[in-house]
Amino acid sequence: MQTGVRLLPKNLITLIQNFQKKGTIIISDEVGCGLGRSGTLVASQMHNIIPDILVLSKGLTGGLLPLAATLISPTILDILSGEIIEYAHTNAGSQLCCRVAIATLNKMRTEEVRKSMKLGETLLRQLVSNVANKIGGTARYAGLLGAIEIPNIESLNFDERQKVYANFLSHGVILRVSPADGKSIPFVPGFTYSRKDYALLQATSQEVLQKIT
């Protein structure tokens, strides 16, 4: 997400799959894109990849409380020693965080949230596509992740990015230019955003970005 929602190219996916067949350990960092954010439960499912190690975090508690989980395959479990598996930080095993995670996962299974997520995927795809077409930019999206790449610029500097952020904020919208490339606006909407929320995002994005282009 920090790089502007850059999707894996097909040749890289094929390369990963071939490496895994030869015994290479595959680690999937899904702290930001896991748990429904990419349109599948975990993003690696999109590419038919079953990682040996899967890292999850933000989606477990909706970003409200600190919690992470590392899932490992039986093969990796056999390799690791008991000492490594038993190692934990001071904050490990928080009952409150775990309760919130369980509640979050149960809520995600409800028909209400599933329908809202599916609607959101459609509305986000329309949003980034429509705004990108208006400004002559590029749209990227997968599930509830999207980005608009601003055309005809190399990269906005810090002060320019802050100005764009302030313009969005003046409309009651928190969006910013990715510092990684200086020209992409990432969209990470909530799973339960309404049509009204997406309409505001689209109108504001179009207004703010047209001033740049």
Image (cartoon, rainbow, N blue to C red):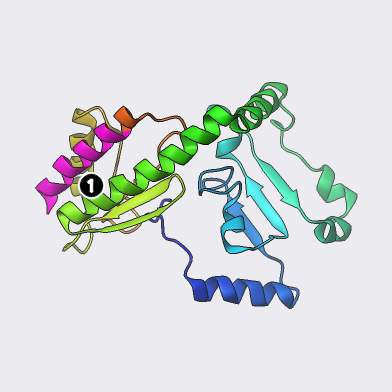
Q: What residue range appears in magenta?
A: 198-213
Query: Left or right: 211 with respect to 101?
Result: left
Is there any visible trace of residue 63 in the rendered image?
Answer: no
- Where's residue 200, x and y in %? 25, 32
Q: Is residue 207 magenta?
A: yes
Q: Is residue 107 above or below residue 118?
A: above
- Where's residue 174, x and y in %? 30, 34
Amino acid on which the number 1 mark rests in the picture: Arg
Secondary element at image label 1: helix
The residue under label 1 is 161
Residue depicted at x 22% and y 58%? 137
Is there any visible trace of residue 179 in the rendered image?
Answer: yes
Residue depicted at x 35% and y 48%? 125
Query: Left or right: 7 with respect to 176?
Result: right
Q: Is residue 186 above or below residue 76?
A: above
Q: Is residue 128 above or below residue 93?
A: below
Depth check, front residue: 94 or 32: 32
Residue depicted at x 76% and y 39%? 88
Q: Is residue 210 magenta?
A: yes
Q: Is residue 147 above or below residue 193?
A: below
Residue depicted at x 16% and y 52%? 134
| Magenta: main secondary structure | helix
Query: Left or right: 79 with respect to 180?
Result: right
Asked which quadrant contains residue 110, the reply is: top right
